Image: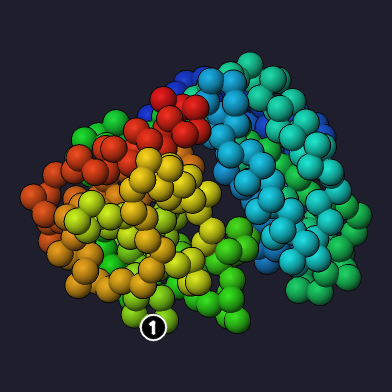
């Protein structure tokens, strides 16, 4: 099944140009079919690392500083030396884009792991050498039907976690609980999983941040039990900049079912409508005008309109 045929918040249109992309692997550029890391790499062994997803629009990487902040904060919090300055990371990403001749419509996955291990175990003292850095740049355009039809969500029984268990504000390679939630949603015929926090309030989706619209206000979670969404923050800021009300607050599943509109935000898709949750239509089951306005304001604010 191609990526275009998959109904998912991470789906994108097929693009033959991606067959020939060069992947950055520790300073070397190799064809995608030959890009490799060792089976002893910390990322493969344990998911020990951090990553960022970047969107290239009209020659510019959207919210680059915010992504770099999250990358370096996450690395520092797990005592991981990336081996690059911020400028060095930007240079490596730009070199990858340049080598692939990319100036627009690309999505970049920047991945950093603790590096090669002497043996498969948890102890970071068994790492040999420097961190592993991989940069994959691909042409990715979201499937247009997602905007016109809207996503269907399914509320997972898997909960998000607090910072004392697994801090989701850490953009780490370890995503198994989110994948488990997504599998439930897929089996239920939905596009994405809606996840509650340990207290029963709505947290986020498995790969996107979630908003509802009530009486013209945007509501999204506080972030205490969900990942730090950069697109989420951009949408809030853009909405508030024109005098709109955007709340970061606790809200319940019952308030989701009775919402006027709903949408999700993410690096790849920007703002995407949600028209159904747990088999129940949100309002009239069609993308709404407030969602469209939030999308327009977001695109304008990041220079992607």
Report the residue at 69% width, 60% height from top.
74
Report the residue at 23% width, 51% height from top.
216
x and y percentages locating residue 62 in the rendered image: 56, 34
> Element under label 1?
loop
Does any portion of residue 139 appear in the rendered image?
no
Vertical relation: 270 (above or below) 50: above
x and y percentages locating residue 99 in the rendered image: 70, 20
Question: Toward which corner of the image does residue 165 lie, by quadrant?
Answer: bottom right
Question: Toward which corner of the image does residue 228 lie, by quadrant?
Answer: bottom right
Q: Nearer the viewer, residue 177 or 5?
A: 177
- Pointer 1 local density, CA inside 10 Å: few below 14, some 14–19, many at least 20: few
Asked if residue 224 lies left or right of residue 73, the reply is: left
x and y percentages locating residue 243 in the rendered image: 36, 45
Asked if residue 203 lies left or right of residue 121, the reply is: left
| Colour convention of the picture | rainbow
Q: Residue furthest right?
A: 129
Q: Nearer the viewer, residue 261 or 8?
A: 261
Vertical relation: 65 (above or below) 246: above
x and y percentages locating residue 39 in the rendered image: 73, 56
Report the residue at 36% width, 72% height from top.
250
Q: Residue furthest top?
A: 101
Q: Nearer the viewer, residue 181 or 76?
A: 76
Asked if residue 62 lies left or right of residue 260, the reply is: right
Asked if residue 22 lies left or right of residue 251, the reply is: right
Q: Residue furthest left?
A: 284
Q: Check disc 1 and report the residue beneath it.
A: 199
Question: Toward which corner of the image does residue 90 lie, by quadrant?
Answer: top right
- Quadrant of the image containing the C terminus: top left
Report the residue at 68% width, 66% height from top.
46
């Amino acid at each position: 099944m191609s990526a275009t045929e998959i109904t998912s918040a991470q789906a994108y249109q097929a693009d033959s140009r991606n067959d020939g992309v060069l992947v950055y692997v520790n300073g070397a550029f190799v064809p995608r079919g030959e890009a490799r890391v060792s089976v002893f790499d910390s990322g493969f062994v344990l998911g020990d690392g951090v990553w960022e997803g970047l969107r290239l629009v009209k020659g510019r990487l959207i919210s680059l500083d915010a992504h770099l902040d999250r990358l370096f904060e996450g690395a520092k919090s797990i005592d991981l030396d990336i081996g690059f300055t911020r400028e060095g990371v930007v240079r490596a990403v730009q070199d990858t884009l340049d080598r692939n001749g990319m100036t627009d419509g690309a999505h970049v996955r920047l991945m950093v792991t603790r590096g090669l291990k002497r043996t498969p175990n948890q102890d970071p003292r068994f790492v040999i050498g420097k961190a592993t850095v991989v940069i994959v740049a691909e042409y990715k355009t979201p499937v247009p039907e997602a905007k016109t039809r809207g996503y269907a969500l399914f509320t997972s029984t898997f909960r998000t976690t607090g910072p004392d268990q697994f801090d989701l504000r850490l953009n780490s390679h370890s995503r198994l609980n989110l994948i488990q939630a997504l599998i439930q949603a897929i089996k239920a015929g939905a596009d994405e999983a809606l996840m509650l926090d340990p207290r029963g309030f709505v947290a986020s989706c498995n790969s996107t941040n979630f908003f509802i619209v009530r009486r013209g206000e945007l509501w999204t979670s506080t972030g205490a039990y969900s990942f730090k969404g950069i697109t989420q923050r951009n949408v809030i800021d853009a909405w508030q900049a024109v005098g709109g009300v955007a709340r970061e607050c606790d809200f319940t599943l019952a308030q989701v079912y009775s919402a006027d509109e709903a949408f999700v935000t993410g690096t790849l898709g920007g703002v995407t409508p949600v028209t159904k949750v747990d088999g129940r239509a949100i309002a009239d089951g069609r993308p709404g005008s407030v969602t469209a306005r939030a999308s327009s304001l977001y695109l304008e604010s990041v220079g992607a309109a």
